Amino acid sequence: MSKIAVIGAGSVAFSMSLIQDFALTKGLSGCTVTFMDINQDRLNMVYSLASRYIKELDMDLNLEKTTSREEAIREADFVINTVKVDGYDFMEAEREIAEKHGYYRGIDDKVSDYYGGFFAYKQLNFFLDLARDVERISPNAWFMQVSNPVFEGTNIIARETGLKVAGFCHGAQGYKDIVKILKLNPEEVEAQVVGLNHCNWLTRFLYRGNNAYPLIDEWIEKESENYWKSDEYLHNPWGYHITPAAVEMYKLYGVFPVGDSVRSVSPWWFNTDLVTKEKYFSSGGPDSEVGWTMYLFGLKMRLRMMEELAKDEKTPITEKLPPRPSGEVIVPFIDSIINNKKEKLILNIPNNGAVEGLPDDVVVEIPVTVGKDTLEREKIGRLPNRLMLHIIIPRWLRMEIVLQAFRERDKKSILLMLMEDHRTKSLEQVEALIEDILSQPWNGSAKEHYR
């Protein structure tokens, strides 16, 4: 009879998949799901869709809705944070400002995973504010960090509060697309995915008990060129799991990248301009002018579909949202805790010795066996030295810089981070960029924060 609070329930990115998984998980029968959002219209829409969906599937869930964060958190056993402060509009405006100053596609150092530096401020500030409310009102609840930046966010919550916290991302499931493209039977595959959020690597890959990496090598040699000429590849900027970029990263680092790693830790020379991006990714990939425009348009279309479906009470929700698991591990985690299922899931949790060479308090993304009183990390050991030195440790240090700048209100730390960007030509360029961004009306609190 647990209570699950969804903060930011109006999220277009997550609300429908959560509804889907809640309604399909029989182990949650009798639980209460409280949807919370400050946008009353979005809240009513999601609540209506969820109510009809669970009724169609004859699922015994108690649904609530509220605009009060404290009310949602009170007596909650799980708090799911899906909030993205202010949406994408200001983020896109900041991208345009950065391009004006010579930073193609934004100011993060790999031109993707755009949550570092200034943009992280609003998110991290909200995450901590929410986490402290949870710690005060329902200190025994699990805090489930879903919205980005998951890596920085889960780290700061784990370090600044006494809450039980875990971060969630479906990107680690990207190895399943590799399995599909290789035409392997997924029931006979064993995969271990390890790393940091948006920086995952296929550290073990077995097929029928044997090392399956030679199957990847064979596919690259004999089939990759034809696949990259196919319609399946050419018209899907979001099909980035086995692109020329992924293959080149495999050759460079010796381990195959999984999920968003191909975007967020790909070498800078893959991302210098659209023509270069198109060499490594279909249509330039998800972070190009083409792919990202498609993503933002897709969000608008998804919202419109949800709004129309909420108004159309005659059409069954299951026609638009077929009753099958979404692939997210958010609800399976809750189910495993409540019902002691001892299920292995890929989670973001503090390292505590699982990955050699990283401190215990750094959040890693690794396989974890989850049960009612169980959170057993899979012992990973040491990753290959080249991968550690060129990818894992630099990404860890970037997280530490973002958190140090946020905690200490240190504008110069962000300046120094931007000075390391390969696109930076001078100190004056960075100083002008910083002042331009902080002078925007939506960044008043950030300007006051960073000294």
Image (cartoon, helix red, strand yellow):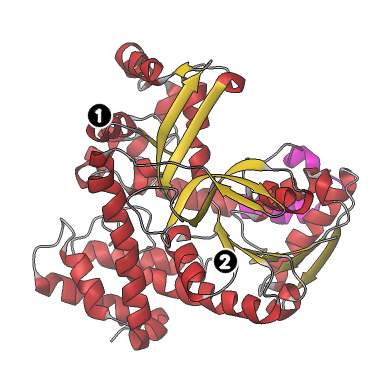
On the image, the x and y values in percent for residue 94 come to: 34, 68
**Which residue is painted at 16% across and 66% down in the image?**
419
Q: Is residue 118 above or below residue 15?
A: below
List the residue tagged with mark 2: 83
Q: In the image, is residue 224 part of the stretch drawn in magenta?
A: no
List the residue tagged with mark 1: 251
**How many discs mark residues in the rendered view?**
2
Q: Would you say 272 lies left or right of 222 here?
A: left
The secondary structure type at the circle numbered 2 is loop
Q: Nearer the viewer, residue 183 or 431?
A: 183
Q: Main secondary structure of the magenta part?
A: helix
Please provide the residue range marked out in magenta. 302-323
Q: Is residue 348 above or below residue 92?
A: above
- Kindly tell me whether residue 440 is visible in this rendering: no
**Which residue is painted at 41% across and 34% down in the image?**
202
Amino acid carrying mark 1 in the image: Lys
**Which residue is painted at 40% across and 46% down in the image?**
195
On the image, the x and y values in percent for residue 39 come to: 66, 72
The secondary structure type at the circle numbered 1 is helix
